[in-house]
Amino acid sequence: MLSANPTNYLTLLRGLRAGDTLVLAASNYDNPNDVPGLPLFDLNGTPTQPIVVTGPDSGAPAVLLGRSTHNTVRLSNASYIVLRNFEIDGRNQGAAGVAAQGLAHDVAIENLRVRGVGDDQQTVGISTVGSTVWNWVVRSNVIEGAGTGIYFGNSDGRSPFIAGIIENNLFRDTIGYNMQIKHQLPRPTNIAGMPTSPQKTIIRNNVFAKSATNSSTRRPCASQNVLVGQLSRAAGPKRTISTRSMAISSTRIRPRRCSRGKATSPSTAM
């Protein structure tokens, strides 16, 4: 276990190996002499020895502060990564809270609070736009006031999101969708390790809400709460939806009226 603070965490992060745990002390993280946030590049754990980056289990949080130049947490050539127990404040600078910027698989995002990513509808809390990913677990997070809560896949059907679990999250007061998982074309065949057999993404026990005071509700045509492929669900207190590759259950959805907009690819700055 490695103890980190705002002055040394990036140095420690870049040296992580399978089985390491980096513990961020309670503080604001924004070193003006280095890049912001968490650059998770070329970091690979194993199924039995993941790389863990965590904030405190209780008390004051570790808060990663965003900048306009970079997505705050960014992953590329990364696998078997666990991110938990910290906050992301994008400071409404226009960058995503968490973004896959390249191949990333077997990633767990747990108990994060993501805020300050609501400057525009196309700013995303958690995004995989432009990247093929699989075995992501997004669990027990709070994403509030985002442009779009989460955006998985891509608008053209490429960059598939495969075999995910999205559960026990609270999405509230987004400008656009709380969650979008885009339709998917046949998977690429040249990516080592990617599942080739039929898979299912599970969405369960989440709350998707837009309050009366959110700016999106004052727009003449605010986006719906949830879009999954070609099937958009915008009403009903509890829905169960099953397709060949997706299951949604025990999810509370507070409805809005209509659908509009999409997210763009986030910054690819390292």
Image (tube, grey):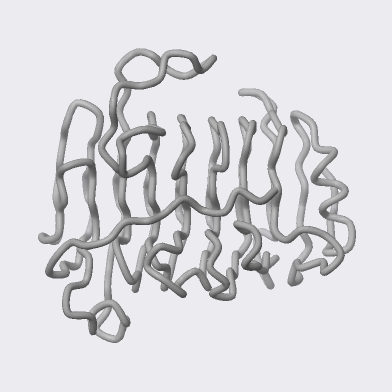
Residue 195 position within the rendered picture, expressed as x and y whole percent measured from the top left? 42, 17
Give the answer, above or below, for where 156 lies relative to 205.
above
Q: Nearer the viewer, residue 260 or 56?
A: 260
| 133 left or right, relative to 86 | left
Q: Nearer the viewer, residue 176 or 83?
A: 176
Residue 181 figure quarter: top left
Residue 268 position within the rendered picture, expressed as x and y whole percent measured from the top left? 60, 48
Labels in figure, total? 0
| 234 left or right, relative to 195 | left
Quarter of the image where the N terminus is located: top right
Residue 203 figure quarter: top left
Identify the residue at image location x=32%, y=54%.
Answer: 179
Residue 79 position within the rendered picture, expressed as x and y whole percent measured from the top left? 61, 30
Residue 262 position within the rendered picture, expressed as x and y whole percent measured from the top left? 31, 56
Identify the residue at image location x=86%, y=46%.
Answer: 12
Give the answer, above or below, for where 119 lies relative to 224.
below
Identify the residue at image location x=10%, y=60%.
Answer: 236
Identify the residue at image location x=24%, y=34%.
Answer: 246
